[in-house]
Each structure stands twice: as structure tokens, then as C-alpha cells.
Image (cartoon, rainbow, N blue to C red):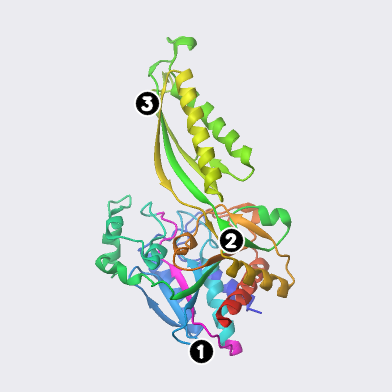
Amino acid sequence: MINGDRLWNRLLELGTIGKQPSGGITRLSFTKEERAAKEKVASYMKEAGLAVYEDAVGNLIGRKEGKEKDAPAVLVGSHIDSVYNGGMFDGPLGVLAAVEVLQTMSERGVKTKHPIEVVAFTDEEGARFSYGMIGSRGMAGTLSEEELVHQDKHGISLAAAMEEAGLDPGKIGKAARRKGSVKAYVELHIEQGRVLEQANLPVGIVTGIAGLIWAKLTITGKAEHAGATPMPIRRDPLVAAAQIIQVIEQEAKKTGTTVGTVGQMQVFPGGINIIPERVEFSLDLRDLDAAVRDSVFLSIIERAKQIGNERNVDVAVELLQKMPPVLCSELVQNAAKEACRQLGFDVFTLPSGASHDGVQLAGLCPIGMIFVRSKDGVSHSPEEWSSKEDCAAGANVLYHTVLSLAMTA
């Protein structure tokens, strides 16, 4: 069994870096807070007897050699950057549990066939540059120099931030792993939802990571005086937007698996006594089945256009991002299921609605995830919490999963 006290103490210690007066944590990529966090995690890796280095995109890596040095490596990890005012478990639990797994192996004298590498990926969240998964894209070989033009709110580009951190943006290709060099990637992560809590279970095995569609809808009507314009002749885009948002909820509910969210809205010109001229709002649509998700999206847009015609307003849709769903491999799922059985946990499976670095690595190697129960399903918040016992339970499942993958051909 892993050392639950050591894991917990490291979570608390790392959680002091970037801590805000609100109690939340802000550790953005290529900042002094992230650098301090990397140094702290590197010290834990060295305690665990790992060979520590950073690759060309800033991924922090600790390697334990296997009996067959040239055998494909088993990767295990997560990220240590955060959103603005986030929690202390999202990302760090996966990295520190991975370190704990290898430290426990070292203390037990366990020798595996395959090398094992702990990875703390660079900028999974994308909070600083509104463009995330930099490290996993780099490792997968899908990150290009053209994508390093994304800027933060101060106008600093990703490329400039990398240079300031001592990295050469022109050499990001060196971070790419060749096909066949990685046997599998496993990540322990908090669920960020309430499924495990509802089931009263500490640990779950992820079946896949939902694919998302991000879009912006712009509804344009006519700005007029709120008091002088009769209701029947108004071209009010906000009322149309309200109807469309209801459609999003209705269409997503129909499938039983799709989730749809409107998280941003702007009303122009924004006067209390002015009928709006224009309304812009976001759409986040996700499902583990791309065909189902796409069908829901088309239904929403079709109905939005109808509402626009009925209310004499223009409806424009801009597709911002489309990511395919990624299924977790049977190889990793089966290893995790057997680990649960060994430890006496129920074998419980669930999809991940949130996206993770594994999405980027799916073209490189088989991927899998293990979830730990989240209190009240809260994440990306200072109130984010998973108990010490649940974190240890997840780390123990991770230990046996990684051991199984690293021992077999």
C-alpha cells in the first residue's frame, strides 16, 4: 500500500504555492508560482529516486528505469498548473500520486520490466493563454510554432513566456515521443462531478473522455427605446437568446448523455432603458459519442435559426473549437478493474465530461484514467476537496494499475 500520509502532506505543501487570500490557488504556466511548484515536485521526484529533467516544452519528468531499458515506457501523471483561483487537487493529485507510486515501488524494491515516467504536463488548463494542453500536445508531436502566438491578458505570447522560462520555442519538436516508445498513459484525477459521490464510492474507472464543441452565437436585432417601442414590433435579440438557451437544455436532455452549457453572455449596448441591439453567448456541448453530440448541435442550430426567423432577428453561429471524444483503452481499463478487485473496491465505470491531457496522447499510445470522488462535485474553486482517505484509495488503485502495465509485455 502507498503511504497515504506522505501523499496528503505533499498535497497540502504544494497547495501553499500560489495560494490566494481567498484560499484558492493560482498557478499559471511559465510564472514564478509554477516554477516554484515545479521545483517542489522535482524534489519529491528525487526523494523517490527518479532521474529528473524537463523536456523542450517544459514538461517535468521523473524516470524510473525498467529491467529492459529500451522497452516502451509507462507514463503516469497529470499537471500542476491551475485555473484562476482554483483548487489544490485538480492536477496535483495525479502528479503526486504518481510520485508516491514510484516511491513505494522503490521502497519495496520492486523492479518492473518497463521504465515508468512521472509527467507533470505544462499548461493543461490553458488559463493564462486561453490555449491549453501545451505539454501533452508537445509530447504527442502536435504542437506547432504557429500556435505559440496565443497571448495572455498582458500581451505576452506563449513563445515569449517560454523564452523567459529558458525554453527555445524553435525546439518544441524535440519534446515529441516517437510512436511505439510509450506503452500506455494513466492519469489519476479528481472526478470534478458528483457521480461517485452519488454512488457512495471512492474510486471509479473512466471509460472515455467526452468530445466537445465550443461555439459562439450572435443574435442581432434592433436597438430601440424601451418605453416607446410597442411589444409586437420589437426585434429583441435577448428574448430570442433566452428561447435558444432553453432549446439547448431541451435538446441536450433528450439524449440522456449530452451536456450543454451557456457560460458566457454579453448584451449590447447594455442600457437599462434600451432594447438590446446584439447579444452574444457561448455554447459548450459535450458527449462521449461524437455522432450524438453533432446531431444535438445541428438540432440546436436549426431551431435557433427558426426562432430568429420568427422574431425577425439574425442568428449567426461561429464554431470555436471541436474536439473528438476519446475512448479509454481496454488495456488500461482492465488493469484498473483488476486493481479495484484486488483492493476490495467496487468496479465502477463512468465517462469524463471534462477534457484531460490524455486526449492529446491518444494518438501516441493507449490511455486510461482513474477518478477519485469529489466532495459536492466542486472543482476549479477554492472549495474543491477530496478526502485524505479517497486520495489514498485512488493512489493505491493507481499503484496496482501501473504495476500491472509495467510488469507485462
Kindly report the secondary structure that dominates the magenta region of the rendered protein.
loop
Expressed as whole percent of the image width and height from the top left, the position of residue 204 reads 65, 62
Question: Which labelled disc corresponds to residue 183?
Answer: none
Q: Earlier in the sequence, mark 1 or mark 3?
A: 1
Marks 1 & 3, CB-CB < 8 Å contact: no
Q: Is label 2 or label 1 in front?
A: 1
Q: Nearer the viewer, residue 9 or 347?
A: 347
Quarter of the image with the C terminus in it: bottom right
Q: Is residue 268 above or below residue 214?
A: above
Label 2: few (<14), some (14–19) or many (≥20) C-alpha neighbours in 10 Å? many
Which residue is under mark 1? 67
- Residue type of the residue flagged with mark 3: Pro
Which residue is under mark 2? 190
Expressed as whole percent of the image width and height from the top left, the position of residue 330 reads 60, 66
Label 1: which secondary element = loop
Which residue is under mark 3? 269
Q: Earlier in the sequence, mark 2 or mark 1?
A: 1
Q: Is residue 192 above or below residue 222?
A: below
- Residue type of the residue flagged with mark 2: Ile
Label 2: which secondary element = strand
Quarter of the image with the N terminus in it: bottom right
Q: How far is mark 3 from mark 2, CA to CA?
A: 41 Å
Q: From the viewer's perspective, is 387 left or right of 168?
A: right
Expressed as whole percent of the image width and height from the top left, the position of residue 391 reads 63, 68
Q: Nearer the viewer, residue 334 or 340?
A: 334
